Amino acid sequence: MINNFNIILPEIFLSLSVFSILMIGVFIKNSFNLIFNLTMMIIIVTITIILSSPSNKEKIFLDSFIRDAFSNYFKILILLSSLFVLNSSKKFIIDNKLDKFEYPIIILLSILGMFFMVSSNDLILFYLGLELQSLSLYILASIDRDNLRSTESGIKYFVLSALSSGLLLYGCSLLYGFTGSTNFEAIANQLNRENTGAVFAMVFILVGLAFKVSAVPFHMWTPDVYEGAPTSITSYFAVVPKVAGLALLIKFMFVPFSNILLEWQTIIIFISIASMILGAVAAMVQKNLKRLLAYSSIGHIGYALAGVATGAISGYQSAIVYISIYVIMNIGAFSCLYLLKKDEQYKENISDLSGISKKHPLLAISLLIILFSLAGVPPLGGFFAKFYIFVAVLEKEMYALAIIGLLTTVMSAFYYLKIIKTIYFDDSIITFESTKNRSAQASIFASCTILITFFLYPSFLNNLVSLLFVSQ
C-alpha cells in the first residue's frame, strides 16, 4: 500500500496543493502574489519528489497507471517549462490585469491532467487526464474576459478542441470494442493488420492527438488562439501541452499500436510533411510575431513527428531530444516578447523590432541567437535537434522525408532571417521602455546560454533520453 502511494505521490501532492491554495484564494483578498509564489514552490517540490523517486517500471490500479523513466522525464520537462513560463510572464500578467488568483491554480490543474496523460497505461485514465488538461486550457485561452480577441480565441479553441476530443473518444470506444480491453498492453496483443475495425479506430485517435500538438491538417486553431490569447497564455500553449502531446503520441505508437507500424506510419509521414511545408510557407507572410511563432511551432512539430514516423526507438529518442530543445528555444523567444513594452503596451508586430539593435543591443543579440537556433543554424542547439532527427530518418532509409525536411528547413530560414534583417538593418522606429523584468531576462539568458553551449556536449541529452527506453 505504501509503495503504491509512493508511485502516485507527485499526483497526490499536486492535487492536495491545488485544493489548499484554492482555499487560500477564496478566503484571502488580493492573494495573487501569495498564490503565485506558492505555485512556484509547489512546482519545485514536485520536481524534487519525482527526482527522488526510482525510475524502475511500476504499475498500479490494475496496470492502468505506470511510473517509469519515460513518464518521469516528461513530467520533469512539463514542470520545468511551466516554471520558466510562469516566472518570465509574471510582470506581463500583472501589467495586463490578469492577476486573478485562479490563474496559477488553473495552470497547476492542467499540469495534473498532463501527469495522468503521460503516466496512463489505459484508455480511460488517458482520456480523463486529457480532459482535465483541455478544460483548464479552455479557461486559460479566454481568461482576459474584457478583451474581444481573447474571448474569440477561447471560443475557437473550445469548439475545435471539443470536436477533436469527440473524435478521439469515438476512436477509443471503437478500439475497446474491437480489442476487448482498454489496457495499452492488452490492446497491443489483440491489435494486428487483420483487425480492420481496430485500425480504423487508430485513425480517429491519431486525429485527436494531432490536434493536441497542432499538426497539419488539424492546426487551424493555432494561429488565431496564439494571436488572440494573452502572450503569457500563448507562451504556455506553445510549450507545455506540446510536450505532453508528443509524449502521448510516442506512447501510443510504441505500445498499443506497435504491431500495426505500416498502417500508422503512412499517416504520421503525411502529417509530418504537411506540417513542415505549411509551417515554412505560411509563416513567410506573417506580420504578427505571435502568429509567426504559431506557424513556426507547427513546422517544428512536423520535424518531431518525422522522428516518430520512423517507428524505431532511435526515432522516438530523436523526437524527445527535439521537443526538449524546442522548449528551450520557445521559452527564450516568448520571454523576449515581454521586453517589447512601449507606452504601457506590449508590442507584437515584426515591424516594431525595426532597428532595435541600435538601442537595445542585448535584446537584439538574444533574438539573433534564438532565431538562428530555431532556423537550425550550427553550432546552436536547434541544429543538433534537427541533426538527430535527420540521422534517425536516414537510418530507416526514408530519403523522401529527409529531403523534404531539409528543403523546408532552408525555406523556414527565410522568415527567421527576415526578422534578423529587420532588427539589424532597418531604421529604428520604437525605443522600448527600460523594463525591470528580471524574470524574463533570466529566462532569456538561460535559454541563450544553453543554446550556445549545447555543442560542447551535444550527446548528453541524447544519452539521457536513451535511458528512457531501457526498461520498456
Image (spheres, helix red, strand yellow):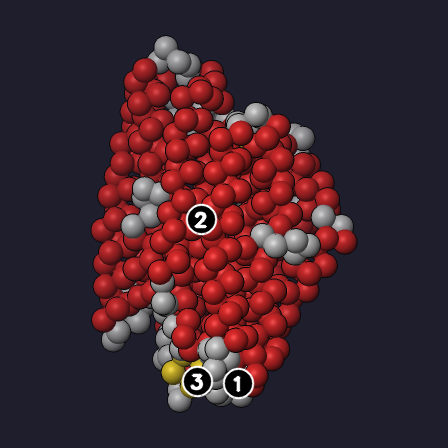
* Residue 36, horizontal then vertical, whole percent: 49, 72
Q: Residue at x 48, y 77 (%)?
A: 426
Q: The disc labelled 1 sits on which kind of residue?
A: Thr
Horizontally, is 332 left or right of 175 in the view?
right
Q: Name which residue lies at 52% across and 68% down.
A: 420
Q: Amino acid at mark 2?
A: Gly
Which one is earlier in the sequence, the residue at label 2 or at label 1?
A: 2
Tag 2 residue: 299
Q: Which residue is mark 1?
A: 435
The residue identified by callout 3 is: 429
Q: Residue at x 57, y 63 (%)?
A: 370
Q: Is residue 116 above or below residue 59?
A: below
Q: Nearer the viewer, mark 1 or mark 3?
A: 3
Tell me, yes or no, if residue 472 can be seen here.
no
Inter-mark Cα distance, 1 to 3: 18 Å
Q: Foreground mark, 3 or 2? A: 3
Q: State the CA–CA distance, disc 2 to disc 1.
A: 32 Å
